[in-house]
Amino acid sequence: MHDNFYSKYSAEIDRFIKQSLQEDIETGDHSSSSCLDGDKTETANLLVKESCVVAGISLAEKIFKKFDPELVVEKHFGEGTELDKGEIVFSVTGKVKSILATERLALNCMQRMSGIASLTKSLTDKIVHTHCKILDTRKTTPCFRYPEKWAVVIGGGHNHRMGLFDAIMIKDNHLDFCGGMKKTLEKTKEYLEKNMLDIPVIVEVRNQKEIMETLDFSWIKRIILDNMNLEELIKSIKLIDGHFPTEASGNITAKNLVQIAETGVDFISMGALTHSARNIDLSLKAL
C-alpha cells in the first residue's frame, strides 16, 4: 500500500520538497561553498543509530534527485524494514556540495518518518489478532502532513482523510452549532447534491440517541464512537449492528488499545501516531 502513496500524492510531495529546499538553502549553501571544490565527488552512508522501522527512503532519494539529478542512491533496504543499530540504509554518491546541501532535509524527514513508522508498527502488532485497523488523524505537523501520513502507511497503519477537502466529518461542534444530528445531516446531504460532490461523510456520535438518529441516513460512510468507555463501545457496536463501519476515537493509548480493538470496532483513530512519535537517530556519514 505504501508503494503507491507517492503516485497518489506526487504533486503534494513534490511541492513539499521544493518548498523545503528553498527554506533551507535560499541563496546558497555558503558553508560548503566556502571550503569545497564544486566538482569533488564522494559517497556517504545513511547510518541507523538505534533499532527502528525505517521510513522515508523514497522521499530522501527524491530530495537528492530534485536538487541534483546526478546524485546516485544505492538502497540496501526497503521502506518499512526493521533494522538494528549500525546498519546502513543506503549510500548516496555524487558531488559533495550537493550531498551536504540536501543532507539535513533528508535526515529530518527520515528521522521523523521512521519514528512514526516504528510507533505505528508497534501498535498495529498489538491488535493483529483482531480485524481492527489503526487510522491516523489530522493532528500532524503543519506543511509536513503528507510525509507523516506516508510514514503511517509504511508502518502498517491506514490514512484517515488527508484534510478538510477530501471528506466530510461531522463532529460535536458541527452538531451543536447546527442544531442537532437530523438537521446537520439533512443540510449536509443538500450541500453534497448542490455542489455535486462525491466525497465520504463520516459522523461522530457521543451517545445512543445520536446513533439512532444517524441510522436513518444510509448514505454515510462510517460512524465514529467518540470518547466512549468499553461498556459504551460494546453497546454502541451492538446497536449499529453492522449497518455502518465503526471507528473508536478519543483518549486511546497503547495501554487500552487492545481492549478497544477486541470490542469488534472496525477502526481506531489515534492522533498519537503523528503527534507523539519520537524521532529516530540517523546520520549521514562520509564513506
Image (cartoon, rainbow, N blue to C red):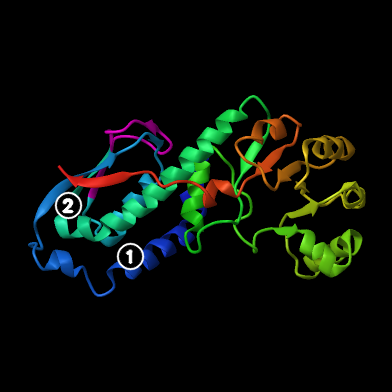
Q: What residue type is labelled 1?
A: Leu
Secondary structure beneath dot 1 equals helix
Look at the image and give the residue range highlighted in magenta: 72-88
Q: Which amino acid does label 2 sit on?
A: Gly
Q: Position of residue 138 (x, y in %)?
A: 60, 56
Residue drawn at x 43%, y 36% as measured from the top left: 80
Q: How crowded is mark 2: few (under 14 residues within 10 Å), some or many (20 or more)?
A: many
Q: Looking at the image, is mark 2 or mark 1 earlier in the sequence?
A: 1
Quadrant including the C terminus? top left
Please tell me the numbered disc located at residue 80. none
Query: Is 184 displayed left or right of 281 in the figure?
Result: right
Q: Position of residue 84 (x, y in %)?
A: 34, 30
**Which residue corresponds to mark 2?**
94
User: Which residue is at the front of the view, 180 or 258?
Assistant: 258
Which image quarter: residue 78? top left
Secondary structure beneath dot 2 equals strand
Q: How crowded is mark 1: few (under 14 residues within 10 Å), some or many (20 or more)?
A: some
Q: Where is residue 253 in the image (x, y as percent from the top left)?
A: 62, 40
Dots 2, 1 in contact, CB < 8 A: no
Residue drawn at x 78%, y 36% as measured from the top left: 230
Q: Residue furthest top?
A: 129
Residue drawn at x 73%, y 58% as measured from the top left: 169
92 to 86, vertically: above or below: below
Query: Is 234 displayed left or right of 47 in the figure?
Result: right
Residue drawn at x 33%, y 57% as measured from the top left: 105
**Which residue corresponds to mark 1?**
21
Find out whether residue 81 is within the magenta segment: yes
Q: How far apart are marks 2 and 1 (CA)?
A: 18 Å
User: Which residue is at the front of the view, 248 or 94?
Assistant: 248
Find out whether residue 276 is within the magenta segment: no
Q: Which residue lies furthest to the front in this view?
A: 255
